[in-house]
Amino acid sequence: MFRHERIRRALAFYNHLPPEERAAVDAHVQRCQECAQRLRAYRAMDEALAALPMPAPSPGLRARFLSQMRGLEAIEPASSPASRLTLARGLVLAGLAVVLILFWGVMHWMSSNGFSRPGMTISSPSPLTPTMMGASTPAEQAGLQEVPFHFDMAQCHYFPNAWNQDGLVALRVDRVLLSVQDWDAHQRWRVEGHYRSAAGDFYLSIFPKAKDYFTYTTQGDSVLREGEGNFVVEGHVSEGTIDLPRSFDLVIFDQTSAVSSMGASCTIQIGSSQPPTPTPTLNPNTASRSTGWQRDYWKQERERALHYAPAVAEWIAQRTWFTLPASIPWDYHQPMNNAIGSMEMGQVQFTYLAPKTPFDYAQRRLSFYWRRGEPEGWDDTTVFPHKFVRPSIDYTLPIQERMQAGRDLPGRFVWSGTREIDGWTGKLWRRKLLGRPDEYWLLWHDADANLTYVMILNARDDSILDTLLQDFHAQNPDRVSAVQQAVMSWTDFSLTWVPPWLTEDLRDVPFTFDPGACFNPDDDAPPPLELNLTRLAVNRAEDGVLRWVLEGEYAMTADASGATPQILLGLYPAHDAMLNGGVLAPFRTSVMRTGVSLLPEYRRFAMLTEMQPPADGSLPQELILTIQVSPQAPGWQCPVRVISDQ
Amino acid sequence: MTESPTDMGLNASIAVTSPPMDLSQEVVRLFDAHHRAIFGYLYRMVGEDRELAEELTQETFLKAFEARHQLPEIANPRAWLYRIATNLAFNAHKRRRRFRWLPWSREVETHGPQGALQAAETRVDLERALGELPPSLRAPLLLSAVQGLSGREIAQALGISEGAVRTRLYRAREQLRAYLQDEV
C-alpha cells in the first residue's frame, strides 16, 4: 500500500508508471480527492504544454545540414572508423584507380609542359565554355582574379565503395579564380576545368579544407553529365576575411546515391605546390570537445581574440561609420547581429525585440544598407534586395557569438554627458558582447541634413576608446599597437578582470559567510571546494545598477575518480529567489550578469555581478552565492549576509 | 509534439548489423525523421530562440554524423539524438548564464477580447513559467509532456537514472504549478 505522499509524487510521472504501480495509484486516486485534482492538473499541464505553438524549422535547414555534412565528409581522414570497415575492399578498387590516375597524371604533366598528347581524348576548347547545369551561366563577379594553384588528380582520395570511380576517368582544373570585395564578408571562389565521364553523372562541389570556414555553393553543385565537357563550380566562403584558405577539396559526388554520395575528394592547393597543411581550428563548436567545457571555452576565446586582434585594430583604424534614417527610434540598445562593409557601402543587421503581445516579444531583424554620405534605407524583414550586399544569415560567427537583448534600462548603456567627435556632439552607447570586445556606438544627429550618424568601434577598455576619441583616424602605429595589446589582454578576465569603469567608487561592505551553511537540494555532500570570501564591495553608478565585486580564495577538491570538477560561481540577491517547499526555485532574476569559472590551476577569484536593486532601492541584506558543478544539477546555494552599517 | 510512427521501425532497423548500412545515409534518415521534433525541443530549451534552436538542431545531427560509426551499437537512436541535443542546449545555457538580463515587463494591458486575451495570457504565462524552470528540470518535462519519450528514453537522453527522472519530473511540475499559481 502506497502512502498518500508517495502517491502524490508518483502522479507527476503517472504516464511512465508500470502497470502494477499505475493500478495502485488509480485505486488511491479514486478515494483521494486531492490526488484526483492534482492528476487532472498535471494532465491539463501536459495538454497545455503540448499545445504550445511550435514554429517549424526553416525549409533551408536540411540543405544546410547536408551541405555541412558533406563538408565534414570531405575533410574527414581516410582512416576514420567508418571507412576502415570498407578499406580492404576499397584498396582493390583503388589499385585500379591508381593505374588510371597515374596515366592521366602523366598526360596532364605532359600537357602542362607543352608536350603533345597523342591519343588524348579530352578536348580543350578555348575559350572555356561552361556546359553544366547549375553553373552554366555563372555571374561575372567584379574583381575576379586568377590565383596560382596546384591540382593533381593523383592526390584524390577515393571513398571506398562510395561510387563507381571508373566512371569519371579524367578531371582537369584549368583556372582558380578568387574575388574578395571589401563590402562583402565572403570570398567568392570559382574553379573551372574539364572532365570526361565514361559512365553516369557526377556532382562537383568545393569546400575549404578546414572546418573553420563555412562555404556554400551559390548556384548549385555542378553536374558532370556523362561524356565530356567543361565545368565551373563556385563557392562562397565566409569567416575567411582574415585568412584565405590554403587548400580546397574538390569533391565529387555520385549522383546515383541520393544522400551519402561522397565519391572522391581531390585537393586543390592554392599558391604553391607544397602539400596542404591543416588550418588551425578556431570554431568553438568543433574544437576540443572532449575536455572540460570551461577550460575549452576560455582557451578558444583566447584563440579567437588573438586571431581577431589585428582585424579589430584595423577596423578601428578604418573608422567604420554609416548613416541611419533619422526616424529610427534609438530608445533601445540595439543588438547588432552582423555588419559588413566599408565606409563606401555596406550592411549592418540588428536583431531586436518588438512587442507582440503585452507579454510577448517577437524577434525581428532590421537591416541597414548604406552608401557613403547617404542612407540607403532600411528593411525590417530578412529579404535583402540590395544588389551589392549579400545577406549573412549563414555567417556563423555572429550566430555563435550572439547576444541576448534585454529590456532597455534608461541610461544604462549611455554615458553621462556627450562626446564630441569631428565637431559633432553625440551620445555614446556601449554594447556588451559575450566573448568579444564590447562595442561603442557613437550616435549624433545632423539636424540640417536630418540624418542620424552612427559610428561603431570595438572596445574593451578606455584605452581603446581614447584611441578613438583622441586620435580619431588612428594613424598612429603606437596607438594601433596599444589596441592590439589591449585586445590580447581581454582573455584573462575570467578570474581577475573587472572593467575599471564599473568599479569606480566601490565601497567595501562587511559581510558574513559560512561555507557550512551551503545548501544543495539534490546533494547532502558539501561543495567540492574550499572557499573563503575575502572581499565584498558594491557601488551604485548613475545608471542605478548595483555592481558587486566579490573576491575570494578557493581550493578545488577532486572527486572520487580523481577528476577536478568544473565550477561556476554566481551571485544573486536573496530577495530575488523564491522559496518553494524549502527548495530555492530559479531566480526570477534582476541580475544582468554574474558568474565566474573556477579553474583548478588558480587559487583566487574575483567576480562582478550587476543587478537591479530591490524595489525600495535599498541595498540587499542577503546575497546567495551559487556553486554550480554541473549544468544539469541545482548546485549549492550559500548565503552571504551583509552587515548593515546603518 | 510526438514522434512519427516510423520511429520504432527506425530503431529496429538500426539494430540490424548485416548487411552493412550506409551510416551517412542513416544519419540523413534520422534527420528527416526527427529534426522537427528535435528543433521543437531545442526551441523550448533555449528560450524560444528560433535561430539558436536551428543552429543547435543542425549541430545535433552533425555531431550524430561525426559519431555515426557508433550507430550500429545504439539501441535507441532517438534517445541518443535527444541526449546530444540536450547537451548542446545545456552548453548554450551555460554560456548564456554569464549574461543574465532583466526579465521583460509584466505589465498587462487589458484591452482586446477578454477570452482571447486570457488565452494568450495563459499561453504566455506557461511559456514564461517554462522559461523560468532550470534546464535540468525543463528538459525532462518537455521530453515527457511534449516529445512523448518514455521514462527510460528520458533517462537515456539526460544520462540519469529513471529514478532521477521521476524526481525531476515531480520537481518540475511543482515549480511550474507554483509559478503559475503565483502569477494568477
Image (cartoon, coloured by chain):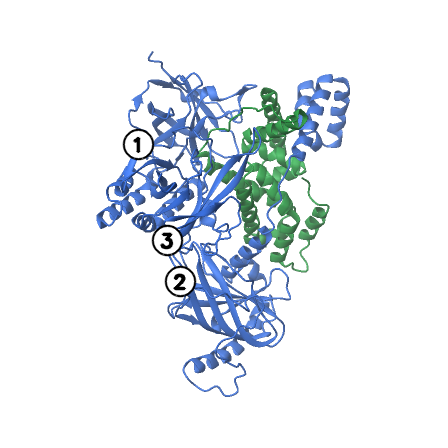
Q: Which residue in the protein does label 1 denote?
A: A501
- How far apart in space, not on screen, are marks 3 and 1 (Cα)? 34 Å
Q: Is residue A119 above or below residue A538?
A: below
Q: Nearer the viewer, residue A495 or A433?
A: A433
Which of the marked residues, 2 or 1, is nearer the chain's N terminus? Answer: 2
**Element marked by disc 3:** loop
Q: Is residue A390 visible?
A: yes
- Which is more foreground, mark 3 or mark 1? 3
Colour chain B is painted in: green
Q: Which residue in the protein does label 2 denote?
A: A277
Name the residue type under label 1: Trp
Do dots 2 and 1 share one subunit?
A: yes
Name the residue type under label 2: Thr
Q: Chain of mark 1?
A: A
Q: Check whether the beta carbons of the residues at disc 3 and disc 1 lie within 8 A of each other.
A: no
Q: Check whether the beta carbons of the residues at disc 2 and disc 1 lie within 8 A of each other.
A: no
- Which residue: 52% across, 81% down? A123
**Label 3 crowding class (10 Å Cα cut-off): few <14, some 14-19, many 20+?**
some
Percent coordinates x, y for residue A84 in the rendering = 55, 61
Which of the marked residues, 3 or 1, is nearer the chain's N terminus? Answer: 3
Do dots 3 and 1 share one subunit?
A: yes
Q: Which residue in the protein does label 3 denote?
A: A344
- How far apart in space, not on screen, are marks 2 and 1 (Cα)? 44 Å
Colour chain A is painted in: blue
Percent coordinates x, y for residue A480 in the rendering = 26, 48
Q: Quadrant of the N terminus of chain A?
A: top right
Q: Chain of mark 3?
A: A
- Which residue: 31% across, 28% down? A503
